[in-house]
Image: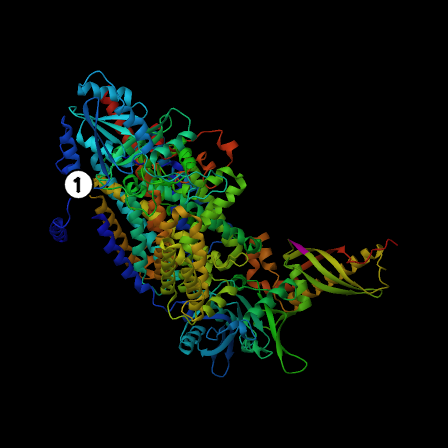
Amino acid sequence: MKKLKIIPLALLFLILFSSCTSGETEIKNRLIIEGVGVDFDEKSKDYEVTVQAFATSQKGGKDNAASNPVVNYTVKGKTLAEALGDLCDVTGKKTLYSQNLIIVIGNSIKGDEIIKSLDFFAREYTARADVYVAASTGKASDILNINENSSEIPAKIIEESISESYKNSISVDTELYNVINLYLEKTTDFTMPLLEVTKEENGKSSTVKVTGTYIYTKNGEKNHLSADETMFFLMLTDDAKKGNFSVVNDDMTVGLDIIKSSSKIKTYYENGIPEFDITIKCNVDMVEYDAGDFGSFKADDVEKVEAAAGKFIANGVQNLLYRQLKYHKSDIFRFGKRFMQSFPKAYKETEENWEDILPEIKFNIKVKTNLRRIGQETLRQH
Amino acid sequence: MFKNMFQKWKKSKIGLTQPIKTDTDDKIPEGIFPALSENIITIREMFGESFDLVIKETQANGIKIAFITLDGMYDNLLVSNAVIAPVLDMKFGTTEPKMIYDHISEYRTSECDTKEAITMPDAVQYLISGCILMFVDGVNRCLALSVQGYPKRSIEQPQSEMQEFGSHEGFVEMYKDNVTMVRRRLKSPYVRFETITAGETSKTSLCICYHAKRADPVTVNGVKSRLKEMKIDIIPGAGAVRPFLEAKGLSFFTSVGITERPDVFAAKLSEGRVGIIVDGTPYALIVPYLFIENFHSLDDYLSRPFYTLVTRTIKMVCFLAAVFLPGIYVAVGTFHQEIFPANIIFEISISIQETPFPLFVESLIIHFIYEIVREAGLRMPASMGHAVSIVGALVIGDAAVTAGLISAPMLIVVAITAICSAVITPLHQPSSVLRLLFIILGGISGLYGIMLGFGLIVINLCSVNSFGVPFTSPLSPFDRYANRDSLFFAGWKTVGKRFMKVQNLRGSDSDANKS
Amino acid sequence: MQTRAKITPFQFYTALFLGRVFSLVAYISNIRTRLSSEETVYETLFMGVLLLITSLPTFFLIKKDSESSIITRASCVSKIFSKALCVIFLIDFYIYAIITSGRFEIFTSSVMFPETNMALVLLALLAVAVYTAVKGIEAIGRSSIVFLIPVLSVFAFVYISLIPDFNTLNFTPMTSDDFSQIFGIGVYSCSRTVEILAISILLPFVRGNKKRGLPIWTLIITATILITNIMLEGVLGEYNKTQLFGMYTLALIAEFEFIERLDALISCVWMLCAVIKLSLTFFICNCLFSELFGKENKLLYHFISAAVIFTGTTIISGSMLDFSNVITSATTIILYLFSACVIPSAVIIAEKVKNGRNGNEKA
């Protein structure tokens, strides 16, 4: 009797649950999004969204010139949700954002519009919170529509470029949740990698390059960092992984690779002005030495190189701080947060006019560089 | 209302099922007749026209004697030398039947094992068991002489439990030979072998084995009572006895162990378990049996502990893969595509784009085909093996994928599942069924259905007690000492320091009684 | 209550731990309560202290007699008293179970199956929980041990894989000396620990030293919540305050090499915690019903409990607004304080009064 009772219950279970599967969530019925580009059309006041998705209807993907064939769609709408909703009508498939690697924000989207355009991805349950967010010097659609050797570059390659650029301290890598985290900090301006379409010399093909760092400013001002400035920025914020720079002096030109970099920032508060002691420690390897014959690098030159490198970094950091804090009044270094952590009550009094305090902030920069290796060439004692 | 309808339906079906007609229902005379001719007539009537009934009437010392046996069941040489010749050569001073009977019983048949049958059913039972019956005219008893010499299989390597370092002896069909193999491995007078008969028609001998100083008396008595209460007509194999020893309640996993190896059997007995050797089958049953023992093999105890850890881990992973991998693949492909790494999802989506069936249906079809091929491989004659291999490999493997009927990733999943299920042979049957269930759950409700199903299975396992011992011991309830030989084996130097009895595991009834 | 099946204290407290972990993962962040990181840490520590204090009546109950449940001891004082306690506890556990199921339904409809009829998923969960409860306390206890392994493994994996993303700069300090929010939220967090109520009822089913386990269990719960909050603050920062289920978002971000999107994994192991929590609830309700109406219709009691919880959940989780309007922090705080502190204290006092009277009569 007990066994008989189980059979109808099991059947009921199966019948009830059969409505859960409608087939539309199957992988073959999904439009798997790899990249999204968001632009704003000033004339029609619509969002123009470019979506890069897997072209799974193409057979024999491996036989194609590109190993990862994609197809781009462009949709429009008053909001991102409306535009992306039209995508289902265009393709007949349900969108899947879980494989989305990058969101590119076009230069037509400024100020708070950037945050509004990201709200959809923060809310969508299939979307990833750690998707890269990047800014474009031009239109986002140009980034995703780039052609190289007649096959389209997928967003994956762009994502890998950003990742490599970050590792080489050319640009930052910012994920969606970090963007929102930094945006919600009242005093901080967040950064994003900056993408640019560059035409080759032959004029026939174009590539996407990561050229530096885009800075979101609350006042909508245009602000960005070059690749060199990004390196100093990452060193200052203790985020630099690798990188390279050259030190040019009267008597030598040295190419150096950053192996390891760390920074410590101590916060002080005197006479109503925050003060920061910045100490940067950097281990470098020599990759090129243009000041004599082969094997001419001497032990005495080590200190010279270290001093020159330290001075180079210190000058770079100082210039960066000056430009951002005094000129642009942009706190991309989270000094406000550090000040808040060390002097919460003082911060509370100053948080509303933090922008005005920024130019007054004092710095003491110390850089300690250590030349770790000089490559395969010998080190002469004298 | 439904209960009444069901009861009416049940009553209408009663007439269709006949009760088991047993031999004892027929009218067999209870006692043995003093007249020899009547005994011969009775036995002839019972066996009818059976060609193998051999009745040899003769005279010894002036008294009629009859030898009754079944052709093929006796050892010719033994019968001639130990039974016929001594009896026929007998020169005894009296012709008193009773005295002649006693003389033969005490002095003439001393070379073979002699039993006395007082009733006809007992005599027939001995006859069927291969004994030769000797009736003396004028005596209402008969002698049953153990002269069995029927053809039997020699001791060979076990077929189902291959071991690298273990002995090459496996159980055989004769339970007495099996008992001998176990006795050679457990040289203790406290190891008991008690036989009972089960099966109304087959009258199969079941030998209950246990170590009197180590086994829990409650378990021993429990086994005995369950076996005695068995209502079964014939026992074709050990598997027929298993259900009567299993724990109450439905479960996919059996709580009765089975082994073909005497060394394993002896080791289990030494841990306080009770074994049942079934006559006519080379498999022995063991209770209590724990779930973790499905992943244990003899080689684990004969190899280095670090290697045992690796092999047991592989077995557990294989079991999980055999049961869950197809269901998880279907669930992820249907509902949770975000789990696929970016590198893989493109390849998978390309592969399944052109297949006509949903992933769920495709998975069910291919797994059914696999089960068909597996069953065919098990049952078919060896001469047909090549044809099935070709059909299985080429048609299903290659042609179906090329034609776009099934996707390549699904085939890979099935292949991995098949290999993994072959690694853990004791769990082969439940894993086959569970696999299909989890495919259904995964296809209907995704990973969450699979997780609920997993929870159900675990809860079911945890609620099973095998003769008072929790089935999921020693993992849950956690027993620190017993876990030296569960997920890993700590080595004989560690394990040998403290002796473990299965009924002393945490959570068992005897453990509860102590506290 | 006469019992035959018993579990060890380790199994018992593991089942309670898994039940509390469920509440932790399903915690719905309320953006109105904008606690800074420092305040969150203080709130968690305060919650731990409060948990220890509010578990004292239960501790003294165990200390005096660790084999009898609170209902049995109340029945020694007065039959009416024990019946009233049964009714109060039934209402308590039903409310908590409806909150549990409601959170489950909101979670599944927000992040798991937004388009699917959640009633079916809830039905399946309740069916599994009923099955577990029918199997008995041994099945619940033993399966808790088994489920603990994947739960701890997934949590540890998520936390360890997020260590590179941990940034101390994401922590926000307290900017004022106002501790009222900390106390308020601490009390609310403490009140979500319904497991304290379960301890006094399930005592006869546990064999071993239960006294020692209680403070250890509260410390482990506090430590788990503290680590979770620290990870939420350190990895997500301000983003945590915008997300409905912070723990889920954390798992979303966690990745290790090619293994990404651990949210599905955490949802799965979290469902196992839901099964244990609900099955314990069903088991306790069954015990309470048996005390009130006898032991003959155990299966019926389970179905009644399942029907009540299903109906209640369907009503309150129709929308986020319904849920937050019905399940206010005041509801759980009052329930908890009354059931975890007042009732056990009342039983202890009533026993002492009765023993005093009996002593006087003898004298």
Most foreground residue, B498 or C318: B498
Q: Secondary structure at mark 1?
A: loop
Give the dominant element type of the magenta stretch: helix, strand or loop.
strand
| Residue A174 image position (x, y, % from top left) | 56, 64
In the rendered structure, does residue A265 fall within the stretch colored magenta?
yes
User: Left or right: A85 with respect to B27?
Assistant: right
Please say if B156 is above or below B329: above
Disc 1 packing (10 Å; few <14; some 14–19; many ≥20): few
User: Left or right: A297 with respect to B364?
Assistant: right
Region in magenta: A261-266
Return the residue found at the far right.
Answer: A382
User: Which quadrant of the rendered structure holds the N terminus of chain C?
Assistant: top left
Residue that badge 1 annotates: B48
Return the residue found at the far top.
Answer: B93
Specify the quadrant of the image occupied by residue B304: top right
**Amino acid, disc 1:** Gly
| Residue A192 image position (x, y, % from top left) | 58, 67
Residue C96 seen: yes
Residue C340 seen: no
| Residue B481 image position (x, y, % from top left) | 45, 33
In the rendered structure, does residue B173 fall within the stretch colored magenta?
no
| Residue A148 image position (x, y, % from top left) | 60, 77
